[in-house]
Image (cartoon, rainbow, N blue to C red):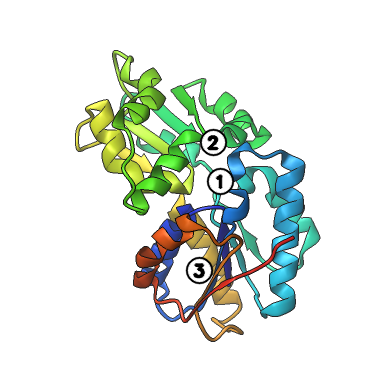
């Protein structure tokens, strides 16, 4: 199984996978050379992801791909499914789930600009806005803050509040917030504190839907695995990668190595 993201957001997905499927082996690609995907063009994203999957497929016998990134999923999933003949699972802002559990019908959606601009998201927001007030924050900065938090680098809470200002200024705040980027899962506490929200706030990060799809595919494949160890690959070696290495220990990777994706 291949899992990838341009940053550490996908590790929030991997953490859950390890708990639910403890015997599954995986390759995680940190495409940190082009982080973040959220400010890239659709053409670049599609070409880059096709390159990643083809390169990994040549080296490792992968049979499932997990796109642990909402931006890539909303922009490129349909193209990837036409390009490859094995299961490719994406993750999307789950507005349907939010609509089912909201009590005050005020739903917050926070995601990268590319995710918000995608036709997938625009269509769903339009459909669900008839019965709900969907308050959108489009930001590429929050992923950078999450990256700093994981690396234990100090970040400004004022910067976080600036991002969340449209919600802070609401007289009635959302009771359900869709985290439309896997990075944002690491910032639930900070988001709640910045908005002065109660503990009953609902956060939706869509991972359950993704894991359900994975479970179905694994069942069809009868849990057959071609990869026999857990591998972490990165596309750029820099000081920020070194700051991440201590965090990776909990994932018990058998191999951590550089891969040239150009």
Percent across and percent down for residue 202 are 31, 39
Q: Is residue 162 left or right of residue 67?
A: left
Which of marks 3 and 2 precedes in the sequence? 2
Rendering quarter of residue 204? top left
Whether label 1 touches label 2, CB < 8 Å: yes
What residue sits 33% from the left and 38% below the top?
155
Q: Disc 3 marks which residue? A: 215
Q: What secondary structure is marked by label 3?
A: helix
Rendering quarter of residue 106? top left
Report the front residue among 202 and 60: 60
Looking at the image, is 31 positioned above or below residue 185?
below
Looking at the image, is 261 positioned above or below residue 137?
below
Quarter of the C terminus within the rendering: bottom right
What residue sits 32% from the left and 33% below the top?
156
Percent across and percent down for residue 197 are 23, 30
Q: Disc 2 marks which residue? A: 112
Residue 106 appears anywhere in the view: no
Crowd class of label 3 (few under 14; some 14 to 19; many from 20; radius 10 Å): some
Q: Disc 1 marks which residue? A: 70
């Amino acid at each position: 199984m291949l899992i990838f993201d341009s940053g550490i957001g996908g590790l929030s997905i991997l953490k859950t996978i390890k708990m639910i499927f403890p015997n599954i082996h995986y390759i995680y690609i940190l495409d940190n050379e082009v982080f973040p995907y959220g400010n890239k063009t659709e053409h670049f994203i599609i070409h880059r992801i096709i390159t990643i999957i083809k390169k990994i497929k040549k080296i490792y016998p992968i049979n499932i791909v997990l796109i642990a990134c909402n931006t890539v999923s909303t922009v490129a999933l349909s193209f990837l499914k036409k390009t490859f003949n094995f299961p490719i699972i994406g993750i999307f802002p789950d507005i349907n789930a939010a609509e089912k559990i909201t009590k005050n019908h005020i739903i917050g959606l926070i995601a990268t600009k590319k995710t918000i601009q995608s036709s997938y998201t625009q269509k769903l927001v339009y459909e669900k806005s008839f019965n709900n007030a969907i308050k959108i924050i489009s930001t590429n900065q929050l992923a950078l803050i999450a990256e700093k938090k994981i690396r234990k680098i100090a970040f400004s809470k004022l910067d976080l509040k600036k991002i969340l200002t449209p919600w802070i200024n609401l007289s009635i705040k959302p009771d359900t917030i869709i985290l439309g980027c896997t990075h944002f899962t690491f910032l639930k506490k900070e988001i709640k504190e910045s908005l002065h929200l109660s503990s009953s706030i609902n956060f939706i990060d869509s991972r359950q839907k993704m894991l359900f799809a994975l479970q179905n595919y694994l069942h069809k494949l009868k849990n057959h695995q071609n990869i026999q160890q857990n591998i972490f690959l990165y596309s750029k070696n820099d000081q920020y990668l070194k700051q991440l290495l201590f965090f990776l220990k909990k994932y018990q990777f058998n191999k951590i190595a550089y891969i040239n994706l150009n």
